[in-house]
C-alpha cells in the first residue's frame, strides 16, 4: 500500500522556523517527484513546492520562494520542507503528495496524498 | 499564473440526480505537442486528504466509480457525477498542471438536496 505520513507541524511564532517531514512507503520513492500542498483554515488548496526524483530540480510558489526549501533523502524514503521566516498566513494543513509520473520526470498532478500536518503561526 | 475559476461555489443535488461542476482556466491548458489537457479533478472530504478523480481532463483514476466523468478542452472543463450518491458529498477542486505554479480552483461544495 502506498503511504505518506507527514510530521513536524506545531505552533510557532511569527518569524520562526520549522521543518516538516514526510515518510513514504509502499512504492519506489526515488522513482517519483514529490510535492507539498497546503490548505489554510477554511480555504482551498494551494500548491507549495515540487522536487524532482533526484532532488536536482525544485519549484516554489511565489508566496514561499526564498523562505521555504524542499529537499529529499532517497536513502530514507523521506521528503522535507524547511520553513523559515514564518508568517501568520503560512498557517495551514500541509500535505505531502506523490506525483503520478515515474521515470525521471513529473506530471504535476497528485495521485497519493498524506493525511497532513498542521502548522500554526501565531504569537 | 494560471487562474482557475470554478462554478458554482456550492451545489445541492438530489440523490440519484446529475451533478455538474464547471472549471475555467485563465489561459489554455491544452498542450499542442501531445494534444493533452493538463487538468485534474479532486474530491476532498472533511478529515481526509484530497483524492484524485480525473486527470488529463477526462481520464478516470483507477478505482474511481464510473459515475464520475470529466470533459472539456482548452479553457473550459466539466466534472459530472451522473447519479449522485450520499458518499459523494464533498468539496471538489480542479487543478491545472500545465505550468508552475500549479493552481487549483476555489472549490465547489456539493451537498444533498
Image (cartoon, coloured by chain):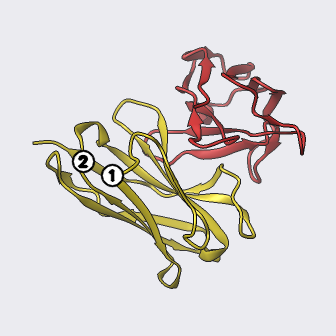
Chain colours: A yellow, B red
The residue shown at (70%, 43%) is: B53
Residue A12 vs B39, above or below: the answer is below
The residue carrying mark 2 is: A86
Q: Earlier in the sequence, mark 1 or mark 2?
A: 1
Query: Residue B51: x and y, percent?
Result: 60, 46
**Where, quadrant-wise, is the C terminus of chain B in this rendering?**
top right
Figure quadrant of residue A104: bottom right
Q: Residue furthest front?
A: A66
Residue in the foreground of this view, choosing between A30 and A44: A30
Query: Residue A54: x and y, percent?
Result: 59, 73
Q: Secondary structure at mark 1?
A: loop
The residue shown at (41%, 54%) is: A116
Q: Determine which of the numbered discs, if any, sits on residue A115 in the image.
A: none
Q: How many marks?
A: 2
Q: Are marks 1 and 2 in contact (CB under 8 Å)?
A: yes
Q: Do callouts 1 and 2 point to residues on the same chain?
A: yes
Q: Determine which of the numbered discs, if any, sits on residue A67 in the image.
A: 1
Chain of the residue displaying label 1: A
The residue shown at (59%, 26%) is: B3
Amino acid at each position: 500500500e502506498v503511504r505518506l505520513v507527514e510530521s513536524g507541524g506545531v505552533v510557532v511564532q511569527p518569524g520562526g522556523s520549522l521543518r516538516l517531514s514526510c515518510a513514504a512507503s509502499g512504492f519506489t520513492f526515488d522513482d517519483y517527484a514529490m510535492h507539498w500542498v497546503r490548505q489554510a483554515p477554511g480555504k482551498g488548496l494551494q500548491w507549495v513546492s515540487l522536487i524532482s526524483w533526484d532532488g536536482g530540480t525544485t519549484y516554489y510558489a511565489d508566496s514561499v520562494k526564498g523562505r521555504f526549501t524542499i529537499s529529499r533523502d532517497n536513502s530514507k524514503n523521506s521528503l522535507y520542507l524547511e520553513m523559515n521566516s514564518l508568517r501568520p498566513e503560512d498557517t495551514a494543513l500541509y500535505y505531502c503528495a506523490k506525483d503520478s509520473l515515474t521515470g525521471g520526470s513529473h506530471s504535476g498532478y497528485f495521485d497519493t496524498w498524506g493525511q497532513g500536518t498542521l502548522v500554526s503561526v501565531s504569537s | 499564473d494560471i487562474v482557475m475559476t470554478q462554478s458554482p461555489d456550492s451545489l445541492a443535488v438530489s440523490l440519484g440526480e446529475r451533478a455538474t461542476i464547471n472549471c475555467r482556466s485563465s489561459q489554455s491548458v491544452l498542450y499542442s505537442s501531445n494534444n493533452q489537457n493538463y487538468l485534474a479533478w479532486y474530491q476532498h472530504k472533511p478529515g481526509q486528504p484530497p483524492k484524485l478523480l480525473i486527470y488529463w481532463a477526462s481520464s478516470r483514476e483507477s478505482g474511481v466509480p464510473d459515475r464520475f466523468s470529466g470533459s472539456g478542452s482548452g479553457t473550459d472543463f466539466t466534472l459530472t457525477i451522473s447519479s449522485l450518491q450520499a458518499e459523494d458529498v464533498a468539496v471538489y477542486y480542479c487543478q491545472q498542471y500545465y505550468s508552475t505554479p500549479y493552481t487549483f480552483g476555489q472549490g465547489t461544495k456539493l451537498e444533498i438536496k
